Image: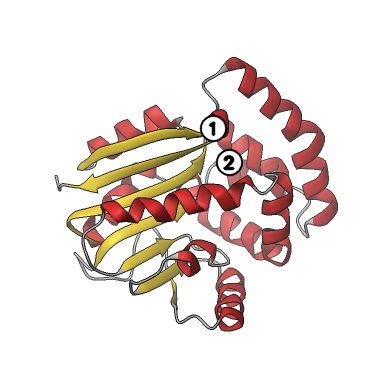
Amino acid sequence: MDQRLARDPAAIRAMFQEVAPRYDLLNRALSLRQDVRWRRRLVAALGEAPAGPVLDLATGTGDVALAVRDRVVIGGDFSLPMLELAGRKARRFGRLVAWVAADALALPFKAASFAAVTAAFGVRNFVDLAVGFREIGRVLVPGGILAVLELHRPRRTVVAGIVRIWNRFVVTPVGRLVSHDGDAYGYLPASVDTFPDRVEMAEVLRGQGFAVLESRDLSGGVAALTVARWEGA
């Protein structure tokens, strides 16, 4: 757990390798399917982006990448088992998406390659958030859009209390029962507690050359959607 909370890349990669087979099932169950609605909001934010290709970073099993329409889409992730599942899902739906093994802090793309980058539940695992945002900026065209969907510490006391109870009595025990990695769903609430809230994350984005267009709570602050435009250093 200590290595994971330090965002050690090898530990995080190993965790996702273990949870991959049950990842979609647990996402839907533990969020009461709110994750589906949140992802729709994330994809809708691409309306702010200029024309051009989209990189879905930390794509996981590809839900966001497969929801993007009328654009060239690349799904990038550093977990090969996740990318394998994404590829199977794409074939099942008859969709063409390029799946690429990619480390978010050292992306294998040329500068100014994308009109937009999306990231759902991925930036919380970056070992260095500022470096990750700077690297995303590098691959965005000037004026390109970064849209981030992430779990954060709720800023409202009542919501925070409900989330603590849900995590203790539902997320952690159910995750341990269903997942191949018993500790992964103990890491989930702990990683949220040790991650900046949406206001603090917006400040990190501004420090790396982004203009924040939107920073909005979802479901009372359980998650948040942050949309930013790349303006350079």
Q: Residue furthest top?
A: 157
Residue underneath mark 1: 194
**Residue 52 visible within the image:** yes
The C terminus, quarter of image: top left
Residue drawn at x 60%, y 55% is 11
**Crowding near pointer 2: few (<14 within 10 Å), some, many (20+)?**
some
The location of residue 176, given as percent across then percent down, is: 81, 49
In this rendering, the answer to whether 111 lies above or below 84 is above
The location of residue 180, given as percent across then percent down, is: 78, 60
Q: Which mark is residue 77?
A: none
Residue underneath mark 2: 5
The location of residue 140, given as percent across then percent down, is: 23, 59
**Left or right placement of residue 173 versus residue 136 in this view:** right
Q: Write down the quadrant of residue 196 in the picture.
A: top left
The location of residue 201, given as percent across then percent down, is: 38, 34
**Crowding near pointer 1: few (<14 within 10 Å), some, many (20+)?**
few
The N terminus, quarter of image: top right
| Three-letter code for the amino acid on which mark 2 is drawn | Leu
Residue drawn at x 79%, y 38% is 170
**Left or right placement of residue 36 versus residue 211 in this view:** right
- Helix or strand or loop: what does disc 1 sit on? loop
Marks 2,1: beta carbons within 8 A? yes
**Left or right placement of residue 40 versus residue 177 in this view:** left
| Three-letter code for the amino acid on which mark 1 is drawn | Thr
